[in-house]
Image (cartoon, rainbow, N blue to C red):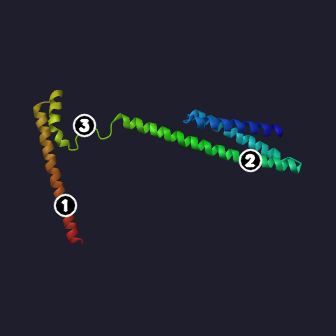
């Protein structure tokens, strides 16, 4: 029983040292957090083994002492798990910030070269189309279609508002 206790005590100290090192380091890698998680799993098994040996102890004083040690180990285990969870959250937050900064760094905010009104860029579109070798007839057809689309949109807006007025007038 003392052998299992000493092994669990060494594991507890090793986990505590690993967590202290990772926390002082700042940002822990996923592999380092994984190693600590594996060590926590073996520590849990050692606690369970020590608990089963404590139940088999015949001398009541030693059994009570062993149960107190198990309780202390379980408290340490809960503290270790909360520290590992905090490390995981800190790593996820750092990764999120890194991804966000990388994404926003690729394209500056509000620095688009496309204007709000797509029809305002017709002159630019014409020069680009001429550069690409599109014929003048095709460009005029596209511009005529855009003009027609504006009129269709305006007519749709008028029909919509007329329909809303009729609904409000007769279904009220």
Q: Earlier in the sequence, mark 2 or mark 1?
A: 2
Label 3 crowd bin: few (<14), some (14–19), many (20+), radius 10 Å? few
Disc nearest the viewer among 3 and 2: 2
Height in image: 54 above or below 33? below
Residue 134: image location, x then y, percent: 15, 30
Is 73 or 129 nearer to us in this picture? 73
SS category of the residue bearing label 3: loop
Residue 115: image location, x then y, percent: 22, 41
Residue located beneath label 2 in the image? 72
SS category of the residue bearing label 1: helix
Q: Residue reaching furthest front?
A: 24
Please state if 169 lies on the left or on the right of 99 as rendered.
left
Label 2 crowd bin: few (<14), some (14–19), many (20+), radius 10 Å? few
The residue drawn where x is 62% and y is 46% is 82
Residue 5: image location, x then y, percent: 79, 40
Residue 41 appears in the rendering: yes
Disc nearest the viewer among 3 and 1: 3
- Disc sitting over residue 161 in the figure: 1
Residue located beneath label 3 in the image? 113
């Amino acid at each position: 029983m003392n052998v299992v206790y000493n092994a669990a005590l060494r594991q507890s100290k090793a986990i505590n040292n690993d967590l202290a090192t990772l926390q002082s380091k700042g940002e822990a890698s996923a592999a380092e957090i994984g190693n600590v998680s594996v060590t926590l799993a073996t520590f849990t098994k050692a606690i369970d083994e020590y608990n089963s040996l404590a139940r088999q102890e015949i001398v009541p004083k030693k059994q009570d002492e062993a149960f107190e040690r198990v309780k202390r180990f379980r408290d340490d285990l809960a503290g270790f798990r909360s520290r590992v969870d905090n490390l995981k959250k800190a790593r996820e937050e750092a990764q999120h910030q890194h991804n966000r900064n990388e994404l926003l760094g690729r394209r500056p905010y509000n620095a688009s070269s496309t204007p709000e009104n797509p029809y305002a860029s017709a002159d630019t579109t014409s020069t680009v189309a001429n550069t690409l070798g599109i014929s003048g007839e095709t460009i005029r057809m596209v511009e005529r279609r855009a003009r027609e689309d504006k009129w269709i949109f305006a007519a749709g807006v008028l029909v919509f508002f007329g329909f809303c007025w009729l609904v409000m007038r007769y279904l009220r």
